[in-house]
Structure formats: structure tokens, C-alpha cells
Amino acid sequence: QKEVEQNSGPLSVPEGAIASLNCTYSDRGSQSFFWYRQYSGKSPELIMFIYSNGDKEDGRFTAQLNKASQYVSLLIRDSQPSDSATYLCAVNARMNTGFQKLVFGTGTRLLVSP
Amino acid sequence: ETGVTQSPTHLIKTRGQQVTLRCSSQSGHNTVSWYQQALGQGPQFIFQYYREEENGRGNFPPRFSGLQFPNYSSELNVNALELDDSALYLCASSLSAGMVTGELFFGEGSRLTVL
């Protein structure tokens, strides 16, 4: 089982719709959850992080976390063509040194059509 | 922009050669992580440096090595390059409080092609 799983997509939505991106993780000890956006040929850009169960809103973006179900999602309201990108879910994991690292999923490709 | 800079941005090497990639972290960040991202995949953790010491390593062979300098900048060295080493190499800086690493901020990456 992969540590962080995402549907690779593509997820196609029309402009103005809500895009829903999902991620599951295997480590019940994980406490920090991140969403990164990556445009083709570019590096990942942090757009949201969430630490507590429930919803966290930032503009058109809402992150949702359910630790009992080991599930984190990202909702993008009023999707725009400029939102077309790959969205990477990342989860913290404790290494055997005691320090933490971020583990990434393979990403979900989002396509927003005009 | 994140303030994390990487060099070179693109490079081409042949099998068996060695490469050094460089990274300057964001001001105030004391931790540097390196990731390898193959085409169509998510970033894979190579290793992490904090206070000039490696404090964690992913599933990469010893020919992948690194350094962190007193100013928190870092290098990634790869010896005996193989075709599968072709990827985007990402440096990320973060602020660590003890063993807890905060969110990562990535540089633009170094795209390595091995022929």
C-alpha cells in the first residue's frame, strides 16, 4: 500500500464548477497535511495546509481533513482555466531518526475547460 | 517566488558521469530537503539536512550524497549516473523546530537528463 494515494486523473471540470480532489494516507500518526499545485514543467507551489479535523478555507480553496478515515481533500470553487495543473497531496511522516519528512502522492491532474 | 534558488536549471550528462546540484535556501530556513521527481510521478524523498547533518534518507543508493553548509545552502551529488536518474531534482527549504519540520518551499528545480 502506498503511503499517500491519489487518483491520477485527469479530472475534467467546466469553468465555474467545483473541483474535488481526494487523497488517502496510510500512517495514522500523520499530523500535517499539505496541498501543492504544480504547473507543467514547474516546481510544486504550496497552496494549503491543514492540521485539524474539519474544514479550512482560503479564498476559493477549502481543505478538508478526516483523520478517522485517513482522508484529506481539496475543493476548488469557481474553477478557472488557470487552475489546470497537477495537485499533489503531501503528508508528514516520522523517520527512524525521529525527524519528519513530507511524503507526496503521485498527484491528480486537473483540467478546467472554458 | 519562494526565495529558494537552484542551479543549474538544466543539464545533460552521460551514463557514468557525476553531477553536483546546488541549492540556496530561503532566508531563515534551517532545513533543506532534496526530492527526485520522475516524469508523471510525485516527488520522492532523497534526504534531508538540518544543522549540516543528514537527518533522514529515502530509498536511494549511496551514490546519492549531499552536504549542507553553515549558511544552510546545500549540494546534491550523484555519482555513476544511470539513465533512470533522469528527473527533476527539487530542493525544498523549511523551518524546523526540533524534529518537527514545517511546510516545504521548493526551488524551481534542476532538470537532469542522462544519455
Image (tube, coloured by chain):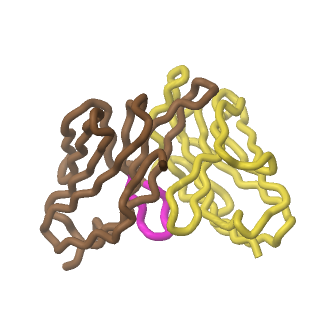
Chain colours: A brown, B yellow
Q: Position of residue A101 (x, y in %)?
A: 53, 37
Q: Position of residue A83 (x, y in %)?
A: 28, 65
Q: Is residue B93 above or below residue A16?
A: above
Q: Is residue A101 above or below residue B85?
A: above
Residue A43 shown in magenta: yes
Q: Is residue A71 visible?
A: yes
The residue drawn where x is 19% and y is 43% is A57
Q: Is residue B5 visible?
A: no
- State left or right for residue B14 relative to residue B7: right
Q: Quadrant of residue A8 in the image?
A: bottom left
Nearer-the-camera pick, B60 or B47: B60
Q: Image quadrant for the C terminus of chain B?
A: bottom right
Q: Quadrant of residue B109 in the image?
A: bottom right
Q: Main secondary structure of the magenta part?
A: loop
Nearer-the-camera pick, B10 or A90: A90
Of all residues shown, which one is farthest toward the top? Answer: B98
- State left or right for residue B27 relative to residue A11: right
Q: Is residue A34 above or below residue B1?
A: above
- State left or right for residue B75 relative to residue A96: right
The residue drawn where x is 24% and y is 32% is A53
Of all residues shown, which one is farthest toward the front? Answer: A1
The residue drawn where x is 71% and y is 54% is B21
Nearer-the-camera pick, A73 or A48: A73
The residue drawn where x is 65% and y is 34% is B56
Q: Position of residue B39 (x, y in %)?
A: 55, 68
Q: For the magenta stretch, what is the residue range?
A: A36-44
